[in-house]
Image: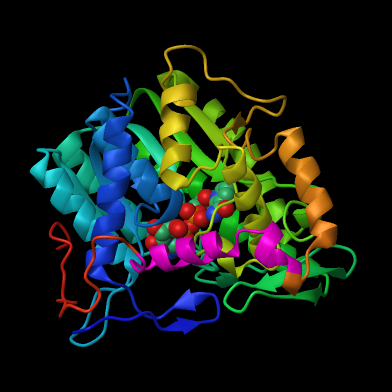
């Protein structure tokens, strides 16, 4: 079939298998171009199919020759209906890993469930014995709690007072005011259950109990802080509470892993266009200003550049892992540089539908958004008849 992008708000209903393949290949090439990392050899990535998780899987495999198991929740294709992009990304990743002689298997299912945890542990036991690194990179709006069966939904709301600020519709470039009513306690609790650290902790407990964690194991989950303009809706909002919980969980995990010299970390990453971040109000406007400034300064990074740097200069640099005063790894250091943030604060007040074309990088935002779904890549013939029924081979 001929596959074109079909946009609905902040999602795209179609994905292009060849474009997703190109995306994965580009990321692999980038990692290879940076040279070998003296990193982990057996890696589990939870949330491995898109965004930071996919970049973590690619960096582990092609930077450090690691065997990887990837867990994700993606929609397979049906005749005449494309799969979700993470499905095609994973198919392409496995194909490239296989060509390179690297072990790669994937599990498609709900990572919050006991079943997927059991399945993953069985796969580790059978194929790898143990794992040295676990990356926890889930971004989900919903979690069915495995013990209670209750469905929890996360919300993106401020806490305390109504939040009013500018936002942009990145499809039209229209800058407008958005007002978001504050969350109630139930909203906060639900968001913490979905995006906080409980599930990460459950994964680590189950794997420790099963004996599949190697001596000196490391586990890393991803967090975000960001600037003052997004604070009310992000870091001091419901999602921020969940990130506080995730960050506190890292210490608890380190405590629980003491006897095997294991460590739990949170890495604070840069704001980037992913399926998760496009859904957060205000963030797209911030990102389009950020991209413009960071590109001008020559310090712009995408997921793969961020994670390659996280591995090579933080986690596996050969020296002690540097952390901030709260014990977090910071790879958002360039985003948070004073000169970058001062410029954003100034441009923020100036941004309107008319000015954004000049002062922001809306084109870059749109390009990245298209890329998430496998569209807009050079070297891909989008007019060609394309097989949508691409399979991820290791999935049973
Ligand atoms: N995008 C950003 O700007 C940004 C910045 C800093 C930190 N982060 C954090 O990075 C992490 C990953 O976010 P992302 O932006 O890469 O998101 P993403 O949407 O690109 O990736 C989410 C991944 O989680 C998987 N997933 C979702 N629900 C699942 C489920 N129930 N079971 C199994 N897999 C499931 C998806 O398949 C996908 O692999 C999140 O914790 C996010 O808060 C994101």
Q: Is residue 44 left or right of residue 287?
A: left
Q: Which residues are magenta?
A: 355-376
The colour mode here is rainbow
* Residue 193 percent across, percent down from the top left: 61, 59
Viewer-nearest residue: 146 or 377: 377
- State whether the magenta stretch is mostly helix, strand or loop: helix
* Residue 74 percent across, percent down from the top left: 33, 68
Report the residue at 19% width, 35% height from top: 128
Image quadrant assignment for residue 389: bottom left
Report the residue at 28% width, 64% height from top: 19
Viewer-nearest residue: 212 or 268: 268
- Extreme residue toward the right, this view: 161
Q: How many marks can you see?
A: 0
- Extreme residue toward the front, this view: 358
Image quadrant assignment for residue 133: top left
Considering only vertical position in the picture, is 207 above or below 395?
Answer: above
Considering only vertical position in the picture, is 65 above or below 77?
Answer: above
* Residue 336 percent across, percent down from the top left: 70, 38
Q: Which quarter of the rendered picture does the C terminus lie within? A: bottom left
**Residue 373 lies in the magenta-colored region:** yes
Q: Which quarter of the rendered picture does the N terminus lie within? A: bottom left
Q: Is residue 235 left or right of residue 331?
A: right
């Amino acid at each position: 079939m001929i596959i074109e992008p079909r946009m609905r708000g902040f999602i795209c209903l179609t994905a292009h298998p060849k474009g997703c393949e190109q995306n994965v290949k580009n990321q692999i090439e980038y990692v290879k171009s940076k040279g070998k990392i003296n990193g982990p050899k057996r890696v589990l990535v939870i949330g491995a199919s898109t965004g930071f998780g996919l970049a973590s899987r690619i960096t582990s495999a092609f930077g450090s020759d690691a065997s990887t198991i990837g867990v994700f929740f993606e929609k397979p294709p049906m005749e005449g209906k494309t799969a979700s992009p993470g499905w095609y990304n994973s198919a392409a990743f496995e194909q490239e890993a296989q060509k390179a002689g690297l072990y790669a298997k994937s599990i498609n299912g709900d990572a919050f469930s006991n079943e997927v945890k059991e399945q993953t542990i069985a796969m580790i036991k059978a194929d790898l014995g143990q794992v040295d690194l676990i990356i926890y990179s889930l971004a989900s709006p919903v979690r069915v709690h495995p013990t209670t069966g209750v469905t929890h939904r996360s919300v993106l709301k401020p806490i305390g007072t109504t939040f009013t600020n500018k936002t942009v519709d990145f499809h039209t470039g229209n800058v407008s005011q958005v007002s978001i009513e504050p969350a109630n306690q139930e909203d906060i609790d639900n968001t913490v259950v979905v995006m906080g650290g409980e599930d990460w902790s459950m994964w680590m407990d189950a794997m420790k109990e099963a004996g599949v964690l190697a001596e000196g194991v490391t586990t890393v989950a991803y967090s975000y802080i960001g600037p003052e303009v997004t604070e009310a809706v992000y870091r001091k909002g419901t999602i921020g509470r969940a990130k506080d919980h995730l960050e506190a969980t890292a210490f608890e995990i380190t405590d629980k892993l003491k006897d095997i010299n294991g460590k739990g970390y949170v890495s604070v990453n840069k704001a980037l266009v992913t399926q998760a971040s496009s859904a957060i109000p205000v963030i797209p406007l911030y990102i389009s200003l950020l991209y413009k400034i960071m590109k001008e300064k020559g310090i712009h990074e995408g997921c793969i550049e961020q994670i390659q740097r996280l591995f090579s200069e933080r986690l596996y640099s050969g020296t002690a892992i540097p952390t901030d005063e709260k014990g977090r790894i910071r790879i958002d250091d360039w985003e948070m540089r004073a000169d970058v943030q001062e410029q954003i604060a100034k441009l923020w007040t100036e941004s309107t539908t008319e000015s954004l074309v000049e002062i922001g990088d809306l084109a870059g935002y749109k390009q990245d958004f298209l890329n998430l779904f496998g569209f807009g890549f050079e070297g891909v013939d989008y007019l060609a008849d394309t097989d949508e029924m691409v399979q991820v081979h290791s999935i049973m």
